[in-house]
Image: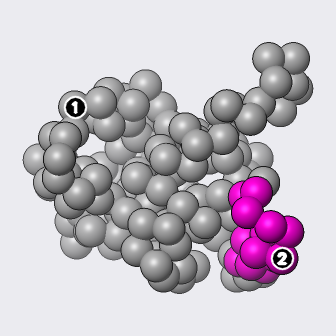
Amino acid sequence: MGQDGWRRSDAWIFVAVVMANGAGRHMRSATTRRPEGVRLADVLSMADHLRQVLPGRREVEEAVRRLTGAALITVDDGWFRVTPSGAAMWRNRRVGVGAVDTVYTQLLRRPLPDDADWSLDETEHAAAILEYAGRGDQGDDPR
């Protein structure tokens, strides 16, 4: 898989992780015990917002393997976070161009890392989709 090169879906998932992390920060209390980061349902929600389609389990799994292997994001105990290296890449994107296209161009300039050891179980992916879908029944509040 690692020899195939960066894919546009890698950029899509990266942008979804970055934007989902930023979108929820204003909702966290300074005294919360909740760790920084977002859950898979948040990533799927943002991915759907970006392209009006939910990414498949394999698409997410492969992108996360490459992105974690490149140290752009981390996933610990189900929490997706942007690393300092990922945040720097995000800050250096060109403004005025679609975020996914810009990030994809930046990824193509990076060497392809070895894939990290990460997998997404089908039931976990399905549960996150159900969680995301259930949010539509609760008004406009995404959380």
Query: Can you see residue 105?
Result: yes
Query: Can you see residue 55?
Result: no
Q: Residue at x 29, y 59 (%)?
A: 100
Q: Which residues are magenta?
A: 129-142
Mark 2 or 1, nearer chain start = 1
- Judge left or right: residue 8 versus residue 61: left
Does residue 35 show up magenta in the picture? no
**Residue 130 location, x and y as percent?**
78, 79
Q: Is residue 89 above or below residue 141?
A: above
Element under label 2?
helix
What's the amino acid at mark 2? Asp
- Judge left or right: residue 122 versus residue 93: right
Q: Quadrant of the N terminus?
A: bottom left
Q: Give the quarter of the image for residue 71.
A: top left
| 117 and 53: which is toward the camera | 53
| 25 and 43: which is toward the camera | 25
What's the amino acid at mark 1? Asn
**Residue 63 location, x and y as percent?**
42, 64
Q: Is residue 42 above or below residue 26?
A: below
**Residue 90 location, x and y as percent?**
32, 37
- Judge left or right: residue 24 versus residue 110: right
Element under label 1?
loop
Find disc 2 in the rendering and name its residue. 137
Structure colour scheme: one colour
Find disc 1 in the rendering and name its residue. 92
Q: Are marks 2 and 1 in contact (CB under 8 Å)?
A: no
Residue 29 circle label: none
